[in-house]
Image (cartoon, rainbow, N blue to C red):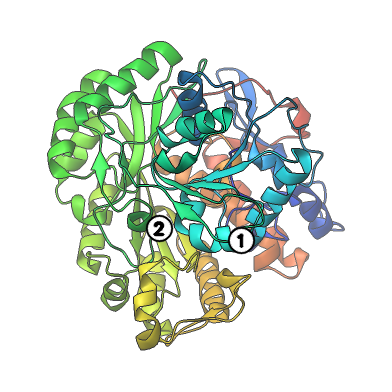
Amino acid sequence: MSGLGPTLKNSDYLATTMLDRQSGDANTAAYLKGTDLEDFGLRRLGFRHNGTDYPLLRPRYYNVPHLTTFAVQEILERAGHHVDTYDATNLWTDDLPAPAPQGDYRAALLSTSFIWTDRDLRNAVRWISATYPGIPIVLGGQYSNLKYTSLMRSIPEIDYIVRGDGEEALPGLLTALEKGSDPETVPNLVYRHSRELLGYRMSPFEYLDLDAFPSPSPKGQWRVIPYESMRGCPFSCKFCSFPAASPKWRYKSAQKIADDWRRYADENGASYISAMDSTFTVPPTRLRELMRLLPDVGVGWEGYSRANVLKTPELIAQLAASHCQFLSIGFESMSDSTLRYMNKKVTRKDNLRAFRLLNEGGLGYRCSFMAGYPGERPEDFAETRDFLSEEYAGHFMLSVFSISDETMPLWEDKEALRIEVHDPDDPDYSWSHIGMDVHTARRLNHTTLDRVRQVNDRAVLRLWQADYQHLLMPQLGRWENIAVEKAVERIGMTPRDHSDPAAAVPQIRKQLDVLSRYGVALYPRADVLSDRPLFHT
């Protein structure tokens, strides 16, 4: 069982608006009832391209395989084990979930990579226990990897946790279960002897040679394939637990990456790779080799970078020539004081240089920021707020600081920064520190998002777009699409910006005028728009 987690953090900002994922249409109808736009709906926005009328907000016409799912499936099938998979997203839906597979199973495996609270994990484990009573439950992935000590003591239904690399541990464990042998010789395990035993034992810890082990492949044809090129991280940002999850930083060679991507193109029909690593653009020697190899591979790709890697226009040009189409960069803050608290090892100057190079270059990008990191005061955050409001252009994300687990290095500063969690069952929403508390951070987050939307014509929050095809208008350029998204955002958020619907109507019409400049019109009905795919070529 693996898949995305129960919710998108910070998505509550969209609640009650037209962009709410669950109730946007109903919110729109209720908000505009009685105005001369009461029949308005975002789904009626469309445009004509090559003689066909398309909706502006088109649902994604393709799925992306889940990396953990196909990786674990291939690992176990290669070892001769039969595997059935179940999308863990079913556990969080309010709709009728897909029926669980049935069979004479020897074990239930749960990935915790997209689970971030004990409450959600307990619910998932209880569901497995009720659905598949009596079989061992095995956990793996980031969350259980970090919190194995507390999880083994607090959730007796858990029999095994795989720490670190699972390529050898999982097949070895299942073989031991089939033979009834002791798993103590299987590497990277945390295990108990019976459900009544709240203590646990640990087997020896070993690391996999990523370059020597074959990279997993999804079955079938996929336009987009996620990819992992490294484990661990060479950096030590205090808000991140990646180094704790895999203390030894390892990475695949540039040649292996190029060979893998060619194979995905040839065997799976992939035209785009999504590199999931925390930082794909390090080390420098590998990046230089990738810039030499990837232009001939001919596959588009996106990945994560650090701001202080992006130093010259020449590198931006090389990235574009390598078919990089999108970079995600964690700026985190524009305050040098806050960046020092984070141990980010970048400065405001580094962030500004990277932003200006990206803004002037040809790559798509998204820069991420947070509000409320321990030690940050409202006046420190004001530097981030002002940058986003006055200078930033392009996609961005602004999150509220999250205390996700006790392994984060920030706890080294607990006394100095007076870091406290007031509700252990809900740490994300109950913290405080010397600079502010979570309520102040959430207020700063929301008021900043409001301000950026209202005053900055070129900065677009990357939050509501996940359900829709990107680009919204593939026949237009990046900055034209930014302008279109900005107008949609301003329309969609009018219930938040205007308590009086009558006052919102002129603002909606103003944004409809903006959209019309790019060929977007308000159609009589949504069902007159084509549901055929329209991809960026």
Q: Residue furthest front?
A: 181
* Circle 1 residues within 10 Å: few <14, some 14–19, many ≥20: many
In the rendering, at what x and y percent does residue 210 appear? 29, 33
The reply, left or right, for residue 413 in relation to residue 90 is left
Q: Dots 2 and 1: beta carbons under 8 Å?
A: no
Closer-to-camera residue (263/512): 263
In the visual, does 529 lie left or right of 65? right
Q: Residue drawn 12% across and 39% down?
A: 285
Q: Mark 2 highlights which residue?
A: 368
Q: Is residue 76 left or right of residue 375?
A: right
Q: Residues within 10 Å of mark 2 (few under 14, many from 20)?
A: some
With respect to residue 325, does 489 lie above or below?
below
Q: Amino acid at mark 2?
A: Ser
In the rendered view, tell whether residue 145 sits above or below residue 105. below
Q: Earlier in the sequence, mark 2 or mark 1?
A: 1
Q: Nearer the viewer, residue 446 or 41?
A: 446
Pointer 1: what residue? Answer: 118
Looking at the rendered image, the disc whose residue lies closer to the viewer, 2 or 1, is: 1
Answer whether residue 474 is visible to the viewer in this image. no
- Image spot of residue 218 (x, y percent): 48, 22
Distance between mark 2 and mark 1 Cα atoms? 26 Å
Q: Is residue 159 above or below residue 17?
A: above
Residue at 35% x, 43% y: name it: 277
Which residue is at the front of the view, 129 or 4?
129
Q: Quadrant of the N terminus?
A: top right
- Visible residue check, residue 495: yes
Disc 1 marks a residue whose amino acid type is Asp
Query: Which secondary structure, mark 1?
Result: helix
Q: Position of residue 302 (x, y in %)?
A: 36, 37
Q: Residue at x 34, y 50 (%)?
A: 246
Q: Going by the picture, which residue comes out furthest to the right?
A: 34
